[in-house]
Amino acid sequence: MLSSRTLVLVILAAICLFVPPSRAQSAGGTDKKVSLQFRNVSVHDVFKTLASAAKVNIVTSKAVQGSVTIFADSLKVIDALELVVEMQGLAFYREHSIIKVVTADEYTTRFGRPFKDRMQTRVVKLQHASTDAVVKSIFQLKSKSGNVIPDTRSNSVILVDLPAILARMQTVIHKLDVPLQTASFTLTHMPVQNIEEVVKHMVSAGGRLRIDPGTNQLVVFDDEDRIARIEAFLDDADRPGAAVAETFQLLYADAEAVASRLQEELTPGLGSVSIDKNSNQLFVRDLPDNLPYLREVVENLDRRTRQVLIEAKIIQVNLSDEFKMGVDWGAVTDKLGGSVNAGSSFRILADSESGGRVRATDLSVNDFSLNGLIEALQSVGQTDLLSNPRITAVDGQEAYITVGSTVPYKTIDTREDQGGTLRTFEKVVTVEVGVKLRVTPHINEEGFITMKIKPEVSEVTSFIDNIPVIEKSESETTVIVKDGVTIIIGGLIKDQQIESEKRVPILGSIPILGIPFRSKSVKKVKSELVILLQPKIITGDVDMKPETSLGAAASGQRR
């Protein structure tokens, strides 16, 4: 058995180890002074900096999170640690040679009492400033656990926070709570409405501004320094001839859009812009020094917008048995004897979708290349020209091409009228299926066209409860091509069932009796849609001759 003396020593050692200290005792270099300059930095990085400076071990629990902003100069490491912990609502204690930082709840759970509470409350009665203005200015200074409460009835501010933070708040309040002076300024050469917003930003948090359009006056309630600054600004701005007016006649750009852009470049409080939609004119008023820049902005915006003529050719190829996997573009170009460079290709649909590739090809060299391509496609199956649309799009605006049909179907809608009776209504709903193509061109200065292409192929596969089931493949891609270069979109493969009927002349046309003399067959055909797109940059002042177009080059190719 242990002796009484040994037992006492063991108990004292246990007490030294497990009694929770309210603050880690100074050890190592925790008395060393540091300067901290952190803005929205992770609290873990702050603790790492303190640990490195004091050569001590600081460990945080998993629940310790957040960021901290602190600017402190010549502060002891242990004091800085305590300040950061209390600002974040955390707690810390020392265990052996390690300082452990935990949340307040974790500290209470471990030691059965809350971490040392240093929060204090102070009531500051204001003499001159308003409580709302003061609270707005100092609220951002409070710690995470602190609070700032306005008491408008007594014109006081209630502060709850750490002593160091309370001292800073009171310093700011002392600077704000000063007697306000009143100054009245009558403008001679400009309306007070034009300069109101600028002066509002010059007034302090506790100041006020009032305008009187009838007398063209501004009344400022603020401290002496602010009023002096506002007076100097008004003397410089309100001068005869300070602002001059100029009219801009726009040829191409929209006046409303240009006016919106000019608002950002006008002299604050002085410049103004108005528009006349009927004549597409701008009326600008600003300082003479700023007008040359405004003229340059208007000139850059009021340029003739280039356009892109997009010619499309949509061809359906019923693939022969040896090309069930789609058009072999290598075999097609071989048929042309290498006169067409098919270039590289890349996918535009998901890997699970059937086909879907884009290929850039220079077919604009001569018409033989395009005609030869159509003829070469005959080697992989029967071709059918479905559509040959031409559409013009302004630079940066979307063009929409669709080739398909509208499928109507009925739906039943049940509604309850005011009398509580349920009534049913039939409604006809339509859905578009087929080939849809959205193209958005962007022209750069080197004559290249960036095209955002969004193809969609859809068809009705069946009906469920009279509602069509639509199978759809769509995707979106962006390609960059030279003016006049043709884009080939291939690999859009689908299966079709073609019904055909054979009958003996005359006899096969007789009702009922002619049944033995006619027969029907259903053939499953795999087809691929090939879409040719050729963008051309146009200005709008030159006629586009039909014989130079992609559609004309391949006219008469329907087979």
Image: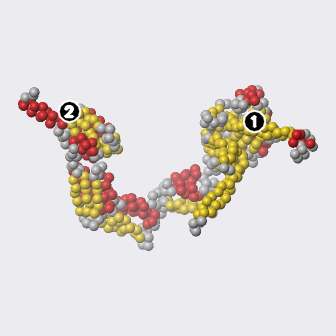
Name the residue beneath numbered marker 2: 96
Identity of the residue drawn at 70% across and 50% down: 407
Specify whether 210 is left or right of 301: left
Return the x and y of residue 536 as percentages of the image width and height: 69, 42
107 and 378: which one is in front?
107
Identify the residue shown where x is 66% and y is 34%: 355
Percent across and percent down for residue 1 are: 10, 27
Q: Quadrant of residue 76?
A: top left
Q: Position of residue 462 (x, y in %)?
A: 69, 44
Separation (CA) of disc 2 from disc 1 = 83 Å
Dot 1 corresponds to which residue? 524
Dot 1, crowdedness within 10 Å: few (<14), some or many (≥20)?
Answer: few
Residue 173 got which mark? none
Most extreme residue toward the bottom is 214
Give the structural element (helix, strand or loop) at label 2. Answer: loop
- First in sequence: mark 2 vs mark 1: 2
Along the line of sight, the residue nearer the viewer: 237 or 481? 481
To which quarter of the image does residue 13 belong?
top left
- Please say which color scheme the image uses: secondary structure
